[in-house]
């Protein structure tokens, strides 16, 4: 599990758990168009994604920050669906669907961070 922090329109942070996958040199996640993180991302692309363990002397904690953009390529979405399904041993089923144009007030969809010195952050 990972945690995503997005920024609400009024500047307050919003933190939510989510499932991530590393694919093609970037970190990806998904969200529904009506979820608060999608609404936040539509207005402000700044995010922080964190993951780690609850042990002081074992494991690794990871923090990735960046700006998000939406991924709409059907081929990429299909590959991501396979990556998530493989990660969860078939317990969760993902399906790539053609994206509709974004609603006026809501965000969502597969998103990918920009190319930069930091690893890109991507979510759906």
Image (tube, rainbow, N blue to C red):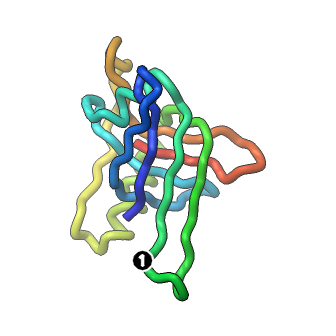
Relative to 58, say whether 12 is above or below.
above
Q: Quadrant of residue 77?
A: top left
Image label count: 1
- In the picture, which quadrant includes the N terminus? bottom left
Q: Quadrant of residue 82?
A: bottom left
The residue carrying mark 1 is 54
Extreme residue toward the bottom, this view: 57
Task: Answer left or right for 91 relative to 42.
Answer: left
Q: Position of residue 104 (x, y in %)?
A: 34, 12
Give 55 or 103, whichever is nearer the viewer.
55
Q: What residue is shown at x 57% (from left), y 65% (from top)?
A: 62
Q: Position of residue 116 (x, y in %)?
A: 75, 43
Classed neighbour count for the residue bearing mark 1: other residues with Cα under 10 Å, few (<14), some (14–19), many (≥20): few
Q: What residue is shown at x 31% (from left), y 70% (from top)?
A: 88
- In the picture, which quadrant includes the C terminus? top left
Relative to 52, say whether 118 is above or below.
above
Q: Position of residue 3 (x, y in %)?
A: 41, 55
């Amino acid at each position: 599990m990972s945690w995503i922090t997005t920024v609400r329109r009024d500047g307050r942070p919003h933190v939510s758990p989510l499932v991530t996958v590393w694919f093609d040199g970037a970190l990806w996640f998904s969200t529904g168009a009506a979820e608060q993180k999608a609404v936040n991302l539509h207005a402000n692309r700044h995010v922080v994604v964190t993951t780690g363990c609850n042990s002081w002397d074992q494991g690794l904690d990871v923090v990735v920050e960046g700006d998000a953009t939406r991924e709409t390529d059907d081929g990429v979405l299909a590959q991501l669906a396979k990556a998530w399904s493989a990660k969860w041993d078939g317990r969760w089923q993902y399906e790539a669907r053609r994206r509709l144009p974004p609603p006026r007030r809501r965000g969502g969809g597969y998103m990918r961070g920009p190319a930069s010195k930091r690893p890109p952050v991507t979510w759906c």
